[in-house]
Amino acid sequence: MESKTLLLVVLGAWLQSLTASRGGVAAADRNDFLDIETKFALRTPEDTADDTCHLVPGVVESVANCHFNHSSKTFVVIHGWTVTGMYESWVPKLVAALYKREPDSNVIVVDWLLRAQQHYPVSAGYTKLVGKDVARFINWMEEEFNYPLDNVHLLGYSLGAHAAGIAGSLTNRKVNRITGLDPAGPNFEYAEAPSRLSPDDADFVDVLHTFTRGSPGRSIGIQQPVGHVDIYPNGGTFQPGCNIGEAIRVIAERGLGDVDQLVKCSHERSIHLFIDSLLNEENPSKAYRCTSKEAFEKGLCLSCRKNRCNNLGYEINKVRAKRSSKMYLKTRAQMPYKVFHYQVKIHFSGTESQTQTNQAFEISLYGTVAESENIPFTLPEVSTNKTYSFLIYTEVDIGELLMMKLKWNSDSYFSWADWWGSPSFTIAKIRGVPDLRHPCVLRLEKRFQNMTQTNASNSCSVLVVVAFGGTSFSGNLEERGLLPGLAGDQVHICEEV
């Protein structure tokens, strides 16, 4: 009797082993993943807002039941800290944008809401467990279905960015890409690389920093570069449309219901910038490598040579350097966010040394397609015999730049009479993207305030017009006598360099 019992036990163990070897859903496989609390929902283009079908690690049928596409890309979206314990409104928007750009792809939303709803330090600590869960899920997909990790793109927001980084560091092989959307700063600014997002976590890591205002370690978004390419829109601090004035306006119109949205406006802008890159693929925003945001504000970095510029978002060029590359750009307050950047240099000349502060100007740009007029800017300091460089940007594409009008809004404390006998105002150089050579420089003195006299060379590519005080300009170039003997079609536009 004992021998028969032993035979039955051995037979049962053999059948269980056979089931597991054939890729079934044996209890042993499920038990290997029972400690995973994180959930993985494969959303569909038809229902981007609901988690209707879950991929369950260890349960092979769940992958087939959710109609996972084994031959397409997979996007894994990881949310951040939450106060409500619910998905935020950006999640279905990002899912929909990913499907619109890549219709045959798989978009998986990672649900760690229970852990993300705790006090921030507790939730920050949970990113290690969430990252481990995500890595185990990805490894299982690769081992069970031979799914290539080169097809995997992780997108993490805030705390989710660090969970994505930890996941990438624990997979059997590196995933193709991780995009960090304003990775969280507190508890991570000074953390070692294995505990946060870092360039080693994927074949390529790109990061958007949109809310880094404050001292290191206390800013909502991490300040240090943590990817191969780190982009800081609008300097990485406050974003357009997220200021206090806008907050007061929204509260007046909608009440206090949207206050939480205003608090995280700049933080969440990273997501909407990426969504914009998915939806407006033909006009990607361009970011520029620069040593600092102060240098960028001076317009010193508008070059695309030697990988000095790159696309923001989905179509970024995967440039891997030994050191993280910090890049900057300006944006609009609303989608589409793209603007067009220009560098302007002004040289002030005079025989007496003078310095004035906070001088207001207006600049207008006229191009082959459109024009952008009366763009205000202020120079903190204006001194004689010095050159000043600054950045301006337009929200419309003016085409190739043909003419620039500059107006000095001098106040009662500083007028042209303050300069030496025959004051002059020289535009030394103007640069844009693409770079322009041979600008047409008009040296206008006080006696030319009526703007009807000057000389211009027919080799210039850009006409620069300077208006003093309340002088205004309008009309055709030839009619105003600004290009004597030079027809409009003879204004040369240089090729991109």
Image (cartoon, rainbow, N blue to C red):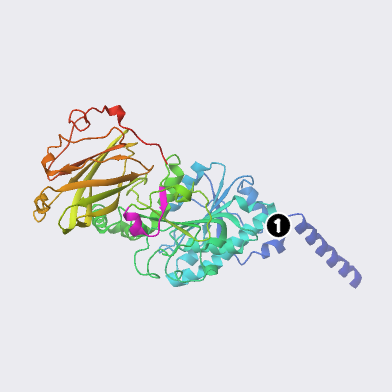
Which of 145 and 417 lies nearest the eye of the viewer? 417
Which of 415 and 460 lies nearest the eye of the viewer? 460
Q: Position of residue 219 (x, y in %)?
A: 37, 67
Q: Looking at the picture, which amino acid does disc 1 mark?
A: Val
Occupied quadrant, residue 88: bottom left
> Is residue 486 shown above or below 472?
above
Q: Position of residue 379 (x, y in %)?
A: 22, 55
Classify the position of the C terminus by image quarter.
top left
Can residue 143 be seen here? yes
Which of 86 and 478 lies nearest the eye of the viewer? 478
Which of 76 and 180 lies nearest the eye of the viewer? 180
Instruction: Provide the residue designation for mark 1.
Output: 25
Occupied quadrant, residue 441: top left
Classify the position of the N terminus by image quarter.
bottom right
- Horizontally, is 198 left or right of 244 in the view? right
Q: Which residues are magenta?
A: 286-298
Can residue 1 be seen here? no
Q: Position of residue 417 (x, y in %)?
A: 9, 51
- Is 451 contained in the magenta span? no
SS class of the residue under badge 1? loop
Q: Position of residue 159 (x, y in %)?
A: 47, 64
